[in-house]
Image (cartoon, rainbow, N blue to C red):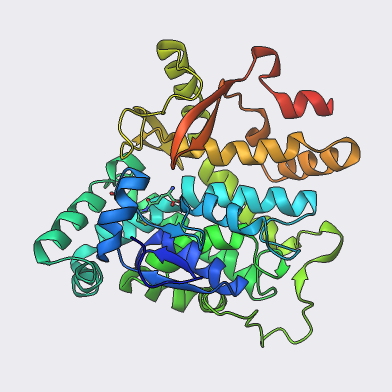
Amino acid sequence: MRTGAGSMVILYGLPHSLYTGKVRSYLRKRGLAHVERSPAHSDFRAEVVPRIGRAIIPVVQLPNGAFVQDSADIIDHLDRDAPRPGALPEGALQRVVALVVQLYAVAGLTRHAMHYRWSCFDEQSAFLNHAFRASCDETGAQAVMARMAGYLPMLGVTTETAPAIERSYHDLLDVLEGHFALHPYLLGGAPSIGDYALFGPLFAHLGRDPVPSQIMKNRAPSLFRWTERMQAPDADMPEFPDHVPGFLPNDAVADSLTPLLRHISLDLFPVLHDLAAALARHVADHDPAEGAPVTDMPHQRILTTIRTRFRGVPHDSGVQPYLFYLWQKITDSVDMLDGSTRERVTTTLDRHGLGGLLTIARPIRVERRDHREVWGRRIAETRAHPVRAASGNG
Ligand SMILES: N[C@@H](CCC(=O)N[C@@H](CS)C(=O)NCC(=O)O)C(=O)O
């Protein structure tokens, strides 16, 4: 039985949870009445976990009683009724850039967020113990922390990759500092799904845990200010008195975002090539049926483990079907375009080293149904490079 939230959205989440941060920020910016509950709330075990099939946050319960899990799905769902412009820009290039940043935030930056949280545990143990004790007793907190730290190998965080991850974090701070010194949000004067996605790792872990947030504050103060801005219910941009609200006009993407796009290209390739090749092998070996769940159990996040490289450093990595779901949002979005608009978007991605997002073939779609990933339809061989082939662009 649902208790005590009336017509409000209920957000089940926690202050230090990466994916909760995305949704909380969206709810605040949209001005949607909501109440946040910890997973320690009795309704979480009694109602939410049975409906979602596993203990995971964030989950929202809508005023009509329906549940939605997955931060991307929650924002997509709520944004359908949002006044325009919503979080998904209407301009083709801005929309694709926001979706690329969304993929990067999960496929790339989760690694940094988890590295700094768990590899630097001893230097920030008081802070983390306090955070994890908020929703369980001491034994439970230790168990949850051990499970979270256990994700490091799947994310490719090892003693060999750690220096490259830290270099990449510093580079990211520099490129984002350059942008946020000039603009309040990624695409101008309003947050997009790119901002919300980036805010997950850049707030809950990297902007909040003692070790990485200290580096961020000293090295990228304008970026740190953006993490504050993303928590405000208003646009919160007094530093930019002349900046127009809303996305930049004419589907423009600021020049100051170019270094971020190059950084994303450097960090996402060749990993995406290797993930796509692993997906093709999995499909050839297992012949999955359309509609079947991608893994046997809802809490299993990976199909298999592969050998890949991050900035030239070899490491093992889990193959998360969820990444194909986010990647597909980019190709779907470009697939809808025609003529000169498509040309403009593909040329821009190529120029920034991101053309592979449109040309690396994946043999099958990944969809989400009943709060988990399921196999979608096969993508025919002849459409192996659907976006580029249709554009006549090589
Ligand atoms: N794709 C999901 C990921 C959510 C997620 O990983 N949540 C973490 C907390 S930030 C969690 O609840 N993990 C529980 C676990 O892995 O056992 C989303 O975007 O909502």
Taking the image as shown, residue 158 lies to the left or right of residue 244, namely left
Q: Is residue 343 above or below residue 362?
A: below
Q: Position of residue 381 (x, y in %)?
A: 64, 13
Residue in the picture at 58% in, 22% down: 377
Residue in the picture at 55% in, 46% down: 103
The quarter of the image holding the N terminus is: bottom left
Q: Position of residue 259 (x, y in %)?
A: 64, 57
Along the viewing direction, whichever of 216 and 149 lies nearer the viewer: 149
Q: Position of residue 160 (x, y in %)?
A: 30, 44
Along the viewing direction, whichever of 357 and 70 lies nearer the viewer: 70
Taking the image as shown, residue 323 lies to the left or right of residue 249, namely left
Q: Is residue 359 above or below residue 119?
A: above
Along the viewing direction, whichever of 55 and 358 lies nearer the viewer: 55
Taking the image as shown, residue 340 lies to the left or right of residue 299, namely right
Taking the image as shown, residue 129 lies to the left or right of residue 36, namely left
Q: Is residue 323 above or below residue 281?
A: below
Along the viewing direction, whichever of 248 and 224 lies nearer the viewer: 248
Residue in the picture at 46% in, 72% down: 6
Residue in the picture at 34% in, 67% down: 14
